[in-house]
Image: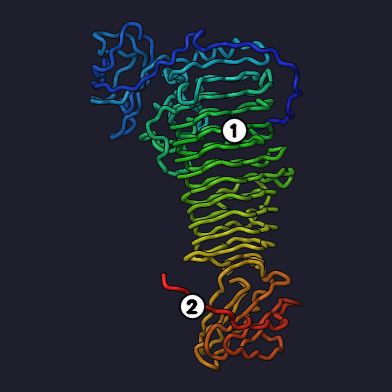
Amino acid sequence: MTLFIGISLGLPVSTPAQSSTLNVTNFGARGDAFETFADTVQGSAMIHLLPTNQLSTADVGKLTLLFGAGPAASSTNQQDLVAQILSVAQGTNITLSAPAGITASQVLVTCGTQNADAFQQCINACTETNAVIQVPPGRYLLVPPVMLDTHFVMAGAGDARPAVVLQTGGIHFLGADSSMSVLLGCGAWQLKGSWVHRGWMFECLGPVKNNAPLIFENLTFDGGVQQGRQAFYNGGPARTSDGAGWDVTHDAVVDIGAPPLHAVKQFINCTFTHWRGEMVKSVASLMDGYIEMTNCAFLDGEASGFNFNFTHRITGCTFSNLDMALEFYVGYMTGPSVFENSTVTNVHNAIVLVGALTNHPTPSYTISGNTFAPSGAGLLMGPARNVTISSNQFFGGNIGIGTDDYAYQGSGINSNIVILANVFQNTGTPFNVAGDGTDSIVNVTITANQAWNCGRFADGYGWSSNVVFRSNRSGGLHAGLLYSQQLLGQWFMDDASNIFPWFTVYDTPPTPAPVTYANGMHQRLFPSATNSLFVIDATHPQQIPPGATLIINNGGTKTCSLLSGVSNGIAPALMPAGKTLLYVWQNGVWQPGANLPQPPPPQNLRILDAP
């Protein structure tokens, strides 16, 4: 994420607004884009369309995007071709402003009016403080003008150019319906110097002149590629050999420039689809605003759906077939953010929160009422603070919620995390600690969550402290436990209110078998002989939480002996079959507590009828 320095100027004061209504078609916009196929000849500017698509002289001046038919990018791959129609003969013989780079048949073509200038003129005509720009049904092709500029050379991976610039607020883009009013971006790629370029659709450029709300409603933002999601995860710009992978120049809406930016942006009933870069993103820092995403869909993208930096509320949205649903830098937000009642499916990671700063307070971030079905993680933090994750459902994935050094951006650590009343089904590990150092995590309460068929309820190899589990339940065919063995910091704090399976300990003669709180408080012993010896591990005193409790049961058929630690002067306790003992960590040793009574024998039993 490229960051540009700015200063927050705060939210604008509401004032009475004047209104006007404009229509993009009155400025020459035409929603006439369509797809077809063509035959090309290398070095020739003449292409032949399928007979089903008949053009006329009225189509002269329109754009064509020919996929895979441009200049060579390598010995085996071609760039795409972006060209204007210069002439039309017999309806299907089209002369373009640039020659094809390859002889081929059935080349995919997007053809339509270039609407970038018409949209820009309509925007520039908005002189009121509350203008409505109507976008009637149609497919409106919006291609950055530099795609036809042979002299444009990118200075770097982030040196993208837009189709349309928004430097004023008080505009409400209003489509007829997101399925009918479609804004079609430039899916064709070209090398502009050493870098792949497709271009942004809308650039929100600061400083904004009229900082009233900017609203997009009932629109589809289509990136124009046939397949957005390719799952390369290469962490860099699109490959220059074939234009595949993540393209940092290919985004629907981008915040950039000096403050102030649009203080309020709203997206209502919008669809974002077929993008190689982040669908909406910020490349501006040290400022904040407010963004609402309501009933929107983010579908088929190589990167993240939402990557704005501003305080936001996302509600009722769908994220599918993406790398990530949301990546958010929390360091600049000045108000609470919310991600709620949304569905995230077929993604690598669902939500990634980064950017907590040591020199900036972090307002709350609430993630509530959502459904997550990732292949990787439901929520990664690196770092984040004051996060509440409640009443969500997690299906599958390697990790439900966790930390990960790989995603770290910021200067603080993860802290004050509440994980409450979530359900995890077939998730590898609902809670995982993989970060350490600056990506450590402290002060976490994990309460009233349910895990079904999860291999481990909690695990990790990073650094954590004061991670407390209460009233959680782990069940199913594969009921996971708490595993702290590899943690660098404090072991997880188990509580008797948790309903976790017992951890099974078998004897290891002639060496005493260790019983360790790293596996949770409930330990069940299975001695193979009457002289079997077990010992409670006290060799990691700095990692055992103060007040930790062990409940140890002899689940076997033979009596065994149990030592409560090393060099503590306490004699081994005899444990007949079925015996349960309690030990409490006090003053650096495991102290025997009151013996727990054995449960009374069952009564009032009856034989069930056969089914």
Q: Secondary structure at mark 1?
A: strand
Give coordinates of residue 38: x percent, y percent. 27, 21
Give coordinates of residue 407: x percent, y percent. 56, 48
Give coordinates of residue 140: x percent, y percent. 45, 18
Name which residue lies at 54% across and 23% down.
Answer: 202
In the picture shown, does residue 334 fall above or below 199? Answer: below
Q: Do tag 2 and tag 1 residues touch (Cβ < 8 Å)?
A: no
Q: Secondary structure at mark 2?
A: loop
Estimate the spatial distance between the alpha carbons at disc 2 and disc 1, rounded to whole Å. Answer: 58 Å
In the rendering, which numbered label is found on residue 293? 1
Q: Outermost residue, top direction?
A: 57
Horizontal side of 489 relative to 305 (left or right) equals: right
Q: Nearer the viewer, residue 453 or 520?
A: 453
Judge the density around disc 2: few (<14), some (14-19), many (≥20) Cα neighbours within 10 Å: few
Q: Is residue 321 visible?
A: yes
Q: Name the image quarter holding residue 94.
A: top left
Q: Name the image quarter holding residue 102.
A: top left
Q: Outermost residue, bottom direction?
A: 531
Q: Is the C terminus in the top left, top right, bottom left or bottom right quadrant? A: bottom left
How many labels were placed on the picture?
A: 2
Q: Nearer the viewer, residue 133 or 263?
A: 133
Q: Nearer the viewer, residue 34 or 179?
A: 179
Q: First in sequence: mark 2 or mark 1?
A: 1
User: Would you name the residue on which mark 2 appears?
Assistant: 607
Q: Amino acid at mark 2?
A: Ile
Q: Amino acid at mark 1?
A: Met
